[in-house]
Image (cartoon, grey):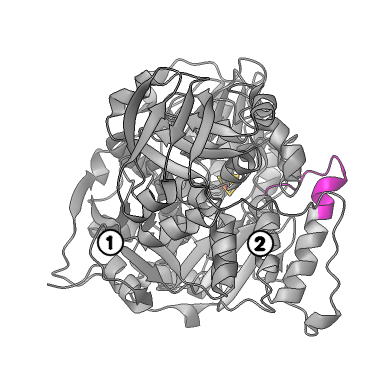
Amino acid sequence: MGQNLTQKILAGHLVSGSLEPGTEIAVRVDQTLTQDATGTMAYLQFEAMHIPRVKTELSVSYIDHNTLQTGFENADDHRFLQTMAARYGIYYSRAGNGICHQVHLERFGVPGKTLLGSDSHTPTAGGLGMLAIGVGGLNVAVAMGGGPFYLIMPKVVHIRLHGRPAPWTTAKDIILEVLRRLSVKGGVGKILEYGGEGIKYLTVPERATITNMGAETGATTSIFPSDEVTLAFLRAQGREDAWVELRPDPDAAYDETLDIDLGALEPLVACPHSPDNVKPVREVGPLAVDQVVIGSCTNSSYLDLMKVAAILKGKVVHPDVSLVIAPGSRQVLAMLAQNGALADLVAAGARILECACGPCIGMGQAPPSGGISVRTINRNFKGRSGTADGQVYLVSPETAAATALTGRLTDPRELGDPPVVALPEKFPVDDRMILPPAADPAAVEIRRGPNIKPLPVAEPVPENIRGRVLLRVGDNITTDHIMPAGAKVLPLRSNIPAMAEYAFAAVDPSFPARAREAGGGIIVGGENYGQGSSREHAALVPMYLGVKAVLAKSFARIHRDNLINFGILPLTFVDPADYDRVGQDDVLEMEHVPETLQRGAELVVKNVTRNATFKVRAQMTPRQVRIVLAGGLLNYTRGNN
Ligand code: F3S
């Protein structure tokens, strides 16, 4: 039996284990990326390992999240990151150079290589045939130190794209269809590998839209083959030397298969407040719209914005709509400026933002209260836009542009024929905003402003855990709920004591005070606890506040790993009905915790308040048990060095 593409890349990077789904494997990491919101912490952690220089083939530090400078904090962080990169052998992509995933695709991604990134949309590089996985910053720090990445071998799903996309059917509509079918947890424990004759109609940036938003299914990653389309993209970037052909064997086996007929798709929209709440655009209207946002790592490529410019050319946005556009990279912006498309966008009334994440992460451009915002981004969780009662709809750039003109959610097919835009044969390459590491690292002084506070480190797990349920939440709690982003909180990413005041702010603002008063405790959650972004602060801050365990019906993958990495026990109810038998403020007790976990046995939880017992399981590998018992990955790594 032949190998699929995922198996080929993993086999070539295997450090330990076999490719049997459900078993633990360790893989060599070729490249890493960080962005500034997760990067400050990742580099503090790397520094704490006392390794003189990164051991990866390539590591890049991007500044794209906290580019708004309303106080000294973000600027301090950027300076810290720049000096860390120069000292430790890391490339530094300056603020304004673009969104990490877009720039990585353009300038650094290599088919067949492994990439670990401290951002949940790292799988974007799968559009180029990389095996790219989003993880917490601590995992990236360990990889930069030369450690392998451990994961449970996922199942591989073959998503076969048949036929040719119908007019106005875009890459965004394809991934929205995948989300409609799989839901926000249907990809958990899986890698989505794309194939079928339909892939030849998708350019690399379009493939990257699909692999980017595969993260919303909970998948470990998504990947496309590396073919002539990939070669054309790399050649246009002046990087054809990086190309290798990569395809699955003709007789490759897959764990599951999903078939999509591209000709039968139509423009789709993910309605509030979940990326899998997908409907045809024509079924959701008429819906008056206040704001249209075009950009983000999902849809901000040259192709995306050229199509938008073609739709808007010679017209003007509807008087009730504020249209904002953030190009994905400086290269994209430069091309739009050179070919006149930028002038078309400005003439149409678009407000052009910096090449950065911006509104996607709630960094500016919050919609009006109760407002309807139509966006090309990848997430529409409640409150993420910065407006608590804002309603965010996720669409393709074409649908967004049509909507900006009419002022109501509009099926772009109403516009007639779609614009035809081709990728250029050559992109204008200018890497002067990417700073290489210093030639003399010893001469670089690491500059830390007052916003850079020392790393909190957890204690090893004690023999017995007794604690109050500090918070009991429902299903699909996101990392945005646990540790919100936005202009107030994001600048505090390297200042955990200050950041802790915002934990669970939208769910229960009294949580931090209660946690401090109780000296820590336990959190109880429902299904898919911790879905969404990779931010390890959603584990780090609860750890700092003394949270010892999270009991949930199920966990999202990255967050579960982050909890382990920060010494918090992620425990699932053996009988999910027991969730209903635990109340907030109940006192819970677990005895002989280390020994029980080492045996792989279920833990008995005594509900002292209700005089009842129930069971939970840890479902951790022996290595994960050792990490969590040590109080997290940093303690564990230091202990092993
Ligand atoms: Fe940035 Fe939003 Fe992507 S925050 S990395 S543009 S998901």
Query: What is the spatial separation of the Cα atoms under label 2 and label 1, in whole angstroms?
Result: 28 Å
Residue 184 placement, left or right of 43:
left
Q: Nearer the viewer, residue 450 or 264?
A: 450
Give the magenta-colored segment's residue range.
65-76
Q: Position of residue 449 (x, y in %)?
A: 87, 54
At 41% from the left and 62% from the top, the residue drawn is 623
Q: Amino acid at mark 1?
A: Thr
Give above or below for 32 relative to 201.
below
Q: Amino acid at mark 2?
A: Gln
Label 2 crowd bin: few (<14), some (14–19), many (20+), radius 10 Å: many
At 41% from the left and 39% from the top, the residue drawn is 417
Q: Secondary structure at mark 1?
A: loop
Q: Position of residue 361 (x, y in %)?
A: 63, 39
Give above or below for 553 relative to 492.
above
Q: Secondary structure at mark 2?
A: helix
Quarter of image, res 223: bottom left
Q: Nearer the viewer, residue 71 or 25?
A: 25
Q: Position of residue 466 (x, y in %)?
A: 51, 34
Give above or below for 464 relative to 514.
below
For marks 2 and 1, the one nearer the N-term is: 1
Q: Position of residue 160 (x, y in %)?
A: 23, 53
Give above or below for 617 relative to 283.
below
At 35% from the left and 32% from the top, the residue drawn is 553
- Residue indicated by mark 1: 23
- Residue indicated by mark 2: 45
Quadrant of image for the C terminus: bottom right
